[in-house]
Image (cartoon, helix red, strand yellow):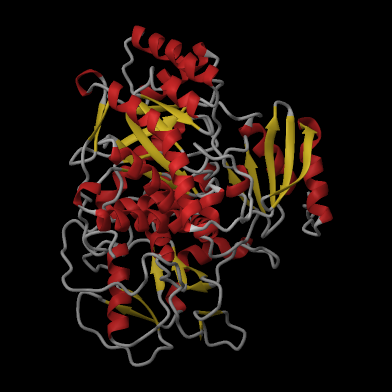
Amino acid sequence: MRYCESPFNFHRRKTREIVIGDPQNGGVIMGGDHPVVRQSMITCDTMDTAASVQQTLDLVAVGCQIVRITAPTVKDAANLQNIVAELRRRGCQVPIVADIHFKPEAALEAVKWVEVIRVNPGNYADSKKFAIKEYTDEQYLAELGRIEEKFTPLVLECLKRQRAMRIGTNHGSLSDRIMNRFGDTPLGMVESALEFARIARKHNFHNFKFSMKSSNPKVMIECYRLLVSRLEQEGPDWNYPIHLGVTEAGEGEDGRIKSAIGIGSLLCDGLGDTIRVSLTEDSPREIEVCNDLLAQIPLLANTRHPIQGSEVSFDPFHFERRKTPEISLGEAVDSLRCGGEQLIRVVVTRSTWDKVAPKIRPKDDVKPEAVYEDLNVAELDPTADFTVNCETQLVTVKDGVNLPAITAFRLLGSKLKRLGRSNPILLKDCLGFEAVPLEPKIALLRASVVIGSLLADGIGDAILVRGESGGGQSLRLAYNILQAAGCRSFKTDYVACPSCGRTLFNLQTVTARIKARTEHLKGVKIAIMGCIVNGPGEMADADFGYVGGAPGKINLYVGKTAIKFNIPEGEAVERLVDLIKEHNKWVEPELVAG
């Protein structure tokens, strides 16, 4: 199995073209050799025609090429007619995607008015009960027959009206049938999508794309790799385009880092025909991040220096941290250690140490753990032959190597494996200092793509961020990347969905309120979900969940189990704090001397 032509050399995956709307009149051709398409989603109530039109126009004004609008009910789907008509009257031809969950009848209404229908195989034809059931082969086939009966009418309407479709599975909303046969796994996500694709192909409908979304970048990367490898196994005419996104990424730096890790790493491997960066912020901000991220890929992917005959040192379809011996980072008896089962360590340059060391307090979680210039580290050129005398030698890629950093470190891992060595590796976000300091937002994206990609491969025992010129900012960025990649937890972790028309409260306001009360809880993971569509599933690895259950009412979860229901929104944050206390995860915030 393979997921790309080469993990060392950039080759964009060859996909079939799909047509969205009228390409001669504002539509989009996706796939083939066409540029990656940027898309986003409006956040208002779909029944508010004026707001839906204005938010769509605002997105188009900043470069959004496809706009998604939720259609949770037939009534919402019917109002898409008014929204689209007003957009066209104003001269806006941007293709509209109707986001469908649970209701096939809403999809059959929406397909009359919009260019794309997004269906989620996990809940399009299933009501999720979290039931435990063993399916015999006969029962499973019977379930597939039931799904085909529900899904075929939409396929036929898309054919008739020349619509496009997105078959989009979510880690948080797999059906009970899939969960019981494949588990909550990347394989389950892929099989869920393929079931629907086979029905579409049975009717000779091919104008569709796939997506595999998760709030965990490592899971998301694994899912897309597995999907592409399975499509290749199915045959050359299964080369459908791919939509990339990390769902429920959150806001601010955390949301951008998670998205850059998941989306950026796959783009660097040549995967992806359209992207959405999901932020708990105003939608137009997502497009700026899309633009910035896409602009970095030609600089981070290996398009110019072909690598021949190398095999990767990691399993692309199953995350496992590369096995290394444990070593000391210094000569002192109490020096920190890295490698083995140790945490992935944060290294800084001497100049950064000089800036931040005077400000570090004994109990601070964000602090340098080693100084690069003081380390006994072997700087190797993976493009040339080298020898390593012992496995307890920390190694890194030499500055100035004429390769992008992702390729260089993958090649280093490959050559070490060929030599039979398992030395710990220090990752760098860049192989030299920039002549002109990068903008902080660009430094953040580059470091996240490079280091995040390698961490998702299982490579790396320590990291060094140098692209960000600010000392304190570079240190914080290193820790934030480790947290987003699931490698370390030094602060509260939030899984927060982007707002949409299904959302039952103001996500940005509520997220800020929850953070104000809980952001001191190191190692606690809290999910903030606007509705129940993906909530319970995406909260699978969260400790606690805050989920919109009805207008003005909140349900609170422990893991994916609802514990408290219909709490008035005004009380819900404090009730969440009470729930955290009940489960012995609460500590009082330290008072800051003023």
Residue pictured at 71% horizontal, 41% vertical: 514
- Percent position (x, y) of residue 365? 64, 63
Residue pictured at 54% horizontal, 17% vertical: 75
Residue situated in front as seen by the camera: 443 or 210 = 210
- Percent position (x, y) of residue 519? 69, 49
- Percent position (x, y) of residue 497? 56, 40
Please give left or right for residue 473 compared with residue 589 in the image.
Answer: left
How many numbered marks, from 0 up? 0
Please give left or right for residue 92 compared with residue 214 in the image.
Answer: left
Name the image quarter holding the N terminus. bottom left
Outermost residue, front side:
138
Q: Quadrant of residue 492?
A: bottom right
Please give left or right for residue 347 compared with residue 570 in the image.
Answer: left
Residue situated in front as seen by the camera: 272 or 425 = 272
Q: Is residue 261 visible?
A: no
Q: Is residue 45 above or below residue 195?
A: above
Q: Is residue 344 above or below residue 131?
A: below
Outermost residue, bottom side:
389
Residue situated in front as seen by the camera: 279 or 215 = 215
Outermost residue, top side:
89
Residue situated in front as seen by the camera: 361 or 123 = 123
Q: Is residue 48 visible?
A: yes
- Percent position (x, y) of residue 337? 55, 81
Residue pictured at 47% horizontal, 71% vertical: 462
